[in-house]
Image (cartoon, rainbow, N blue to C red):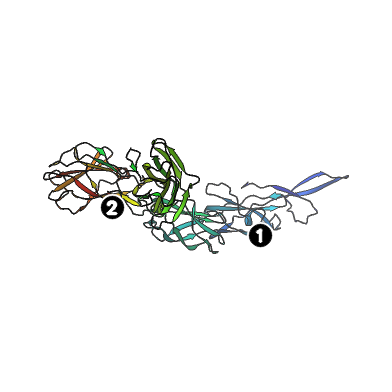
């Protein structure tokens, strides 16, 4: 213990010059007579100095001597924190040091003080006073590039410092392996580059530099990549008559909105299929887990049995990326006309790039050679930030061997259009509208910076004039109105579609973007047929 010393007894046979005033002691010997020895006090150590070089501390001190001038050649070195707590000291300075200097390597970052105490045989002298404080820098990682990442993948430049020389350093993002591995030069620092990969979610992240000898440093970054999601609405309610009717896309929901295919052969044939092209709303570069194809269908008659198997294909190339079931082992069968649901894992759809480019081709047979009824054909899954459902933009029915494609009218301009079920009134009323509900694709942690509603419309019959304004809802809550009964957004009296883009600043949170509802109020002038055709209804959402 510091400030204390112990007394040692030395045999007279040791040639030491003891001072005359030294204490003496005697004890019985092994034979007759008596023997004696002098008691010598161990000295206190001399206060050391400490010098830092990177992660090493060199401790030096003046040697101690015994009374009479004999030098002491071994010492114990201790390290303390600023609160006086003893620390575990590195190997070069641990145990007994046979010199008046030692260098402790790989010293942890912090502020330290050192002491020394002389030792001789089994005895230890008093601990010296503590050295002046020395500060060892902790391993550090810093970036010279901006730590707000706005595109992926991206490379950040930076520096690591105060690492123990000779290590290899691996960079990890939020515990996921990424970036490069490099050797640290003897100086303990190095210029580095770290790649932040595509698919990193927006938000706060930590980059770790992990040394092979145990050094760890970290630096915070923020990923704020701007994304744009454009999606159509499959949920359509037509209140042109004054009351809503469900006109949603067949095969999108479990809502009794179904379609019947053509007649199928009684045995599987690869020329006879039903193909679904899903929408592509997901940002690229992310992993997908839990991919599932959900298919609801029924046979053509009560006593019939229909079976199916399917392939997952690339919509862009037609390439097969996964096969589920076969002609000899179908995925599922249904007997009778009651719709049944089948959910099949499609783990091969493991990235958002594949999910955005997927096509499901269903092969079927019907025991009596009849049509089958389809209610739903969706793909579901999850990204690191949100779950999703993909809906068919179109389906191609080749059940008879001759393909015929049906597009969802609101998904894209050109091709098919949706014609309202009833005539519009000659002036705006609160009960006459088209209502579309958009699916949810925006992560709940995102920062939403606005939306745009895109609509393309025309009066069905020439010679009429159609005008509209819109209301925007989040659930049952009205959050925005654009145009009015007296100042419509636009009017169209031609047979050409009018494409409008309406800014929706009220779409400013994920909750408002996900499941957004737009009511479009129309009136059409003139007599006779006063319906409208809608060629496009989309919601564009910008977010980070």
> Image quadrant of residue 308?
top left
Taking the spot 38% from the left edge, 59% from the top edge, the residue there is: 146
Residue 286 visible in rendering = no
Residue farthest to the front, as pictured: 368
* Image coords of residue 293 (percent x, y): 42, 45
Q: Residues within 10 Å of mark 2 (few under 14, many from 20)?
A: some
Residue 198 visible in rendering = yes
Q: CA distance from mark 2 to mark 1?
A: 84 Å
Q: Mark 2, mark 1: which one is toward the viewer?
A: 2
Depth order, front residue of 6/269: 269
* Image coords of residue 264 (percent x, y): 40, 46
Please tell me the numbered disc located at residue 99: 1
* Image coords of residue 379 (percent x, y): 40, 46
Residue farthest to the right, as pictured: 32
Please tell me the numbered disc located at residue 412: 2
Taking the spot 57% from the left edge, 62% from the top edge, the residue there is: 166
- In the rendered view, tell whether residue 294 sits above or below residue 43: above
> Image quadrant of residue 50?
bottom right
Q: Regarding mark 1 in the picture, which secondary structure is present there?
A: loop
Q: Is residue 20 left or right of residue 350?
A: right
Mark positioned earlier in the residue sequence (2 or 1): 1
Q: Is residue 335 left or right of residue 40?
A: left
């Amino acid at each position: 213990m510091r400030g204390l010393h112990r007394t040692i007894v030395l045999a007279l046979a040791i040639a030491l010059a003891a001072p005359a005033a030294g204490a003496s002691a005697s004890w019985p010997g092994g034979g007759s007579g008596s023997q004696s020895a002098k008691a010598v006090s161990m000295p206190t150590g001399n206060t050391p100095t400490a010098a830092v070089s990177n992660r090493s501390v060199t401790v030096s001190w003046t040697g101690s001597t015994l009374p009479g001038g004999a030098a002491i050649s071994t010492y114990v070195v201790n390290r303390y924190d600023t609160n006086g707590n003893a620390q575990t000291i590195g190997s070069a300075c641990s145990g007994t040091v046979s010199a008046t200097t030692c260098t402790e390597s790989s010293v942890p970052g912090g502020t330290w003080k050192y002491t020394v105490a002389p030792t001789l045989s089994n005895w230890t002298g008093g601990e010296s006073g503590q050295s002046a404080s020395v500060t060892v820098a902790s391993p550090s990682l810093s970036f010279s590039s901006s730590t707000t990442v706005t595109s992926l993948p991206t490379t950040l430049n930076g520096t690591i410092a105060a690492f123990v020389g000779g290590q290899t350093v691996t960079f990890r993002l939020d515990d996921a392996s990424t970036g490069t591995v490099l050797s640290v030069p003897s100086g303990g620092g190095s210029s580095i580059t770290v790649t932040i990969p595509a698919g990193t979610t927006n938000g706060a992240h930590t980059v770790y530099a992990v040394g092979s000898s145990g050094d760890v440093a970290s630096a915070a970054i923020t990923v704020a990549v701007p994304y744009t999601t454009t999606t159509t609405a499959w949920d359509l309610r037509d209140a042109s008559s004054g009351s809503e009717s469900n006109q949603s896309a067949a095969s999108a929901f479990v809502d009794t909105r179904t379609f019947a295919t053509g007649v199928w052969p009684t045995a599987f044939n690869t020329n006879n299929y039903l193909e679904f092209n899903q929408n592509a709303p997901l940002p690229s570069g992310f992993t997908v887990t839990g991919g599932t194809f959900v298919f609801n269908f029924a046979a053509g008659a009560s006593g019939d049995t229909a079976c199916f198997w399917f392939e997952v294909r690339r919509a862009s190339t037609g390439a097969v990326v996964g096969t589920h079931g076969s002609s000899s082992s179908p995925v599922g069968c249904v007997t009778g006309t009651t719709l049944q649901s089948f959910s099949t894992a499609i783990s091969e759809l493991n990235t958002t790039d594949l999910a955005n480019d997927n096509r499901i081709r269903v092969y079927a047979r019907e025991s009596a050679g009849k049509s089958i009824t389809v209610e739903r054909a969706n793909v579901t899954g999850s990204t690191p930030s949100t779950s999703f459902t993909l809906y068919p933009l179109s389906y191609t029915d080749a059940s008879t061997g001759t393909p015929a494609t049906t597009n969802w009218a609101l998904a894209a301009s050109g091709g098919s259009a949706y014609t309202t079920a009833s005539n519009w009134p000659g002036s705006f009323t609160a009960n006459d509208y088209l209502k579309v509900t958009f699916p949810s694709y925006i992560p709940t942690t995102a920062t939403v910076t606005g939306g745009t509603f895109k609509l393309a419309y025309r009066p069905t019959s020439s010679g009429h004039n159609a005008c509209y304004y819109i209301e925007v809802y989040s659930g049952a809550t009205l959050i925005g109105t654009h145009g009015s009964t007296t100042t419509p957004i636009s009017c169209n009296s031609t047979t050409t579609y009018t494409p409008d883009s309406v800014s929706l600043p009220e779409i400013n949170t994920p909750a408002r973007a996900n499941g957004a509802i737009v009511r479009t109020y129309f009136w059409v002038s003139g007599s006779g047929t006063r319906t409208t055709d809608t060629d496009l209804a989309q919601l564009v959402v910008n977010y980070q």
